[in-house]
Image (spheres, grey):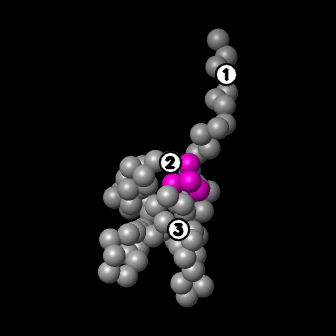
């Protein structure tokens, strides 16, 4: 984790662990505009703001929640 101007930024690996997704899914979130990525200096590494990741978690449907049984 990197802190810059009071904001916490996570690497791809850290963001994937927090969201419990694969890197491809993370990149899809960025390409669809659900999440922003930030360049770290002149390097190609991308960072993700922790606050935005947690906001995405709050609106994402919980995948662990069982579906309600259908009444026949």
- Which quadrant is home to the N terminus? bottom right
Q: Residue furthest front?
A: 43
Closer to the camera in the image, 70 or 26 = 26
Of marks 3 and 1, the one in the foreground? 3
User: In this figure, which residue is indicated by the disc labeled 1?
Assistant: 69
Please give the range of residues in magenta.
16-20
Residue farthest along the top direction in this orientation:
72
Residue highlighted by disc 2? 21
Crowding at dot 1, Cα within 10 Å, few <14 / some 14-19 / many 20+, comes out as few
Query: Who's the residue at 46% across and 47% down the image?
Result: 22
Q: Earlier in the sequence, mark 2 or mark 3?
A: 3
Residue 61, quarter of the rendered image:
top right
Circle 2 residues within 10 Å: few <14, some 14–19, many ≥20: few
Determine if residue 52 is in view: no
Q: What residue sits right under mark 3 in the picture?
A: 10
Between the residue at mark 2 and the residue at mark 1, the CA separation in whole angstroms equals 27 Å
């Amino acid at each position: 984790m990197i802190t810059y101007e009071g904001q916490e930024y996570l690497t791809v690996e850290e963001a994937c662990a927090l969201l419990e997704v694969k890197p491809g899914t993370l990149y899809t979130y960025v390409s669809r505009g659900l999440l922003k990525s930030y360049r770290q200096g002149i390097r190609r590494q991308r960072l993700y703001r922790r606050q935005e990741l947690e906001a995405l978690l709050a609106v994402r449907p919980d995948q662990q929640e069982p579906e309600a049984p259908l009444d026949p």
